[in-house]
Amino acid sequence: MKNICEYTAHEIHEKYISKELKVVDVVKAFFNKIKTDDEKIKAYITLCEEEALKDAELIQAKIDNGEEIGPLAGIPIAIKDNMCTKGVKTTCASKMLENFIPPYDATVITRLKEAGAIIVGKTNMDEFAMGGSTEHSAFFKTHNPINLNKVPGGSSGGSAAAVAGDLAPISLGSDTGGSIRQPAAFCGIVGLKPTYGLISRYGLVAFASSFDQIGPFAKDIEDTANLLNVIAGYDEMDSTSAKLEKIDYTKSLINDVKGLKIGVPKEFMGDGVNDEVKAAVKNAVEKFKALGAEVSECSLPATDYALPTYYIVACAEASSNLARFDGIRYGYRTSNYESLDDIYKNSRSEGFGEEVKRRIILGTYVLSSGYYDAYYKKAQRVRTLVKEGYEKVFENYDLILTPTAPSVAFDVGSKVNDPLEMYMADLMTVSINLAGVPAISIPCGKDKEGMPIGLQLISKHFNESTLLQAAYTFEKNMEV
Amino acid sequence: MAISSEEVKHIAALSMLNLSEEEINKYTNNLQEIVEFANKINELNTDGVGESTVATNAFNVFRKDEPRNSLDRELLLSNAPTSNGEAYSLPSMRN
Amino acid sequence: MEYEVIIGIEVHAELSTKTKIYCGCSTEFGGDPNTHCCPVCTGMPGALPVLNEKVVEYAVRAGLATNSTISRNCKQDRKNYFYPDLPSGYQISQFDLPLCSDGKLDITVDGVTKDIGITRIHIENDAGKLIHDVYTGGTLVDLNRAGVPLIEIVSEPDIRSADEAVAYVERLKGILEYIGVSDCKMQEGSLRADVNLSIRPVGQEKFGTRTETKNLNSFRSIARAINFEIERQKEILESGGVVYQETRRWDDEKGEGYAMRAKEEANDYRYFPEPDLMPIRLSEEYIQSIKETLPELPEVRYKRYVEELGLPEYDAGIITSSKLLSDYFEVAANECKNAKAVSNWIMTDIIRVAKELGVEYDELPVSAIQLAHLIALIDNGTISGKIAKEVFADMVETSNDPEKIVEEKGLLQISDEGAIKEVVDKVIAANPQSIADYKAGKDKALGFLVGQCMKEMKGKGNPQILNKLILEELSK
């Protein structure tokens, strides 16, 4: 029989309804598991045990009262530490915010609380979500639960490792250039980056405002759909939030892909992709064909330009978004100053880590006088081409299928000194953020060392339903 | 196009970052490498292509001119490195 | 050498919306420090801006009232710089696509009317306030004002003198008040001007180097700062020196301007489109609907005052130069139906009192209704004009109603002929020499006698009746 911590959220929910499990016991089980296993995995920065146990009692009382509960009621959830939680430290894994306690909840947190979800803790990440391995945390590195010598991916590595390591059944991450999908692939779980605008960014500490999007990590598609149902939807506090009718994503849990047109862009299956990854993806293509989908090769010609475009725009926005960290109203303040300039410069230089400073410098450079047109403006035009590339493919296809990452999880420490090589790990994911379309990473195999391989499915704006249906069908028919 | 350490110093000043000589050298090299990589986009012809400055097609997203509660001041100032209970404060300095 | 002065002015006006530009915090002036603040306006991590629709409406109103073209498509941009009063490290402003552009206003100086071009009007957020901490010698940051909506109105370099500059800002202030988009209270900082100024020898085509004197918040300081800067630049040029492009401040107490400490790094604001805010697209119908709600503008009121109410042009000009003053006039004139008297009181006493007390016309101790009642007391013969001045002084002191003052102080005019006759008889009996003088043709003696009678009656005698009775007595 499975241990409590191995259950999916919907399995736990069923056992609440059938009274096989009590919320407090489930919450306690996760905290016990965290106490034994998180010493090695290091997924969490902050734990909220006291509050969680209190919340658990409240939900249990509702269940005992015979009240109807939603699918997330009493379900433990881990939150990436860049989403503001009122009264609970939100550090962005940065020395800059080491002691920052937000006076407000992010909209997603409010919605989770309303749904009765129980926040277990805040998870480690690359500092300010800048990185792809969770090695750029100012506090400690997170390890991949599948193999502790490997990185969990990033930047949402803590949230992915928490789910993969059974330290929470579900979690939230944020994805700016692949930060949900790549760690999901590396850790062998499901990670969804929703359409830009589907989920409120209010309370998400901004890295790159026009790319950032919050999304779920889960062990399966059903949990993904349930979590998405709770967090998706219009929010008047976020101008980029889309005003659309609410969709019930559990309606997409249909085991059928017959007639679905899937394109496999040749640019994503080139030399840069590891052979074992390629083989696993080809295998998935055959599976989809066998299940009745029409799969054929397509092309996204601007793909080669997506990565530099992404880095230019994301760093430009980041350089401005991170200007608010000045040591005056919150966050780290240097003790070494004689002038106002010192307060600014020393607080920022001491408070930000190396990768963050590197990106601020790049971002400031591309916006500075003389370079704006050649880099920032040009990149925004290329971004249009990337977007149009997707639109064109979606005229003929329902979905696009690619590997999530060019390789499996790499060794801890192997890329940390080569920023450009680290950026290359985002090759398969960033163009999706440029276009703003949704994409999901689902496990599709393992390499010979047993490391998970991720399959990425991409769909049109706000068409998460098709994405989930295809992913669900794949999950039901593929033994990974 | 070579990026000079002087340029990196200027950029660091604009970004309010204080960099050591060692960091300046490191970031000059990094920036050089990344910018060379970024120059790839200039291969692409984008004549007549519009800029995607915002990620969605929405426009005219407004709120009504209706008051909302402000934050309790104590809570607002609770994260300030220093305050006098009413305002954020900065120590006395020469400039 | 003769120089030509070239001036362009940037006016920042705080919009009188209820809430801030990007959040629901109050814009009210004078709250306790940091009590009108939230995660958005204090630049907390994760907070996001949402544009107040009234800000767009008010900016469009300002654009229409200044004959500007309203942009159908525009966006907001981030202007990046570090300063402790700027919580997010950038100001949200508009860079290359402002809401309004290509407007103009006419001004009249010394009887000459000319157009001043308006380059653009854009929306942006105000910064907070830095306060010197007297206890520690440090700086305190109050963010109540951070996020209050502003429009920046940029003029063409069409202004040639301090007088024209003042006339332009007065005109602009009048319009913004009239259309109700800003209260333009200069002493509260809700209207401030930055003056760009250069000089060049007459006949030279090339512009001189310009300086920018920032944050002038009274007409007096605008005029003085301009004249100071003209003289300063003249002296530099005459002595063979070079004017540097710099940002300057004006010290109104010392009456001199000074250059701000030159920043180590040249400003590079790294403007880029604000990714947290969506573009603004205005339809023809929307603009038309705003146009229809614009109130009577000062020039329309001016015309009505001169043509229908018979006010002197000068008076009408002064009164309509301020919406508050003009509103005061409207209320008072409507109440007492004596527009000319109201105008006279405004020109002589109301403006003076406002200046002496340093208050706006809606904060005067004498309300427009009270002034109207005072005028009515004169018009119906209850008090004399002379007594009215006394009553007015009392009203300024106490804010009491004129009727109450007149009654309490017993200032009712004496019009009873019997009572007056008694005094006249007494005065005539006591001054035989004056009567002789009068009869010998010295008219001055009459004035003396009237004065003596008034003195006896403590100024309360009805002058017409008094005059009549003395003349009767003298002609006997």
Image (cartoon, coloured by chain):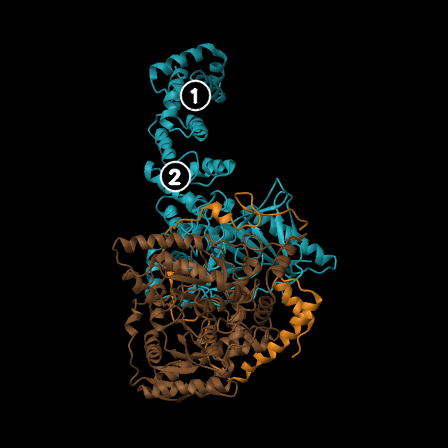
Chain colours: A brown, B orange, C cyan
The amino acid sitting under disc 1 is: Gly
- Closer to the camera in the image, A157 or B42: A157
- Closer to the camera in the image, B87 or C82: B87
Which residue does the image show at 39% across and 21% down from the upper left? C411
The kind of secondary structure element at disc 2 is helix
- The residue that label 1 is drawn on is C459
Identify the subunit bearing mark 1. C
Identify the subunit bearing mark 2. C
Image quarter hosting the C terminus of chain C: top left
- Closer to the camera in the image, C223 or A4: A4
The kind of secondary structure element at disc 1 is loop
The amino acid sitting under disc 2 is: Lys
The percent position of residue A132, horizontal first and vertical second, equals 52, 72
Image quarter hosting the N terminus of chain C: bottom right
Whether residue A28 is visible to the viewer of this picture, yes or no, is yes
Disc nearer the start of the sequence (2/1): 2
Q: Could you give the CA–CA distance between mark 2 and mark 1, rounded to whole angstroms?
A: 25 Å
Marks 2 and 1 on same chain: yes
Report the residue that reaches farthest toward the left: A66
Report the residue that reaches farthest toward the bottom: A296
Crowding around mark 1 (Cα neighbors within 10 Å: few <14, some 14 to 19, many 20+) is some
- A96 versus C228 height, above or below: below
Please indicate whether residue B27 sits to the left or right of residue C336 in the image.
right
- The residue that label 2 is drawn on is C340
Crowding around mark 2 (Cα neighbors within 10 Å: few <14, some 14 to 19, many 20+) is some
Please indicate whether residue C191 sits to the left or right of residue A287 in the image.
right
The percent position of residue C222, horizontal first and vertical second, equals 57, 50
The percent position of residue A425, horizontal first and vertical second, equals 52, 78
| Labels 2 and 1 touching (C-beta < 8 A) | no
Which residue does the image show at 43% across and 44% down from the upper left? C319
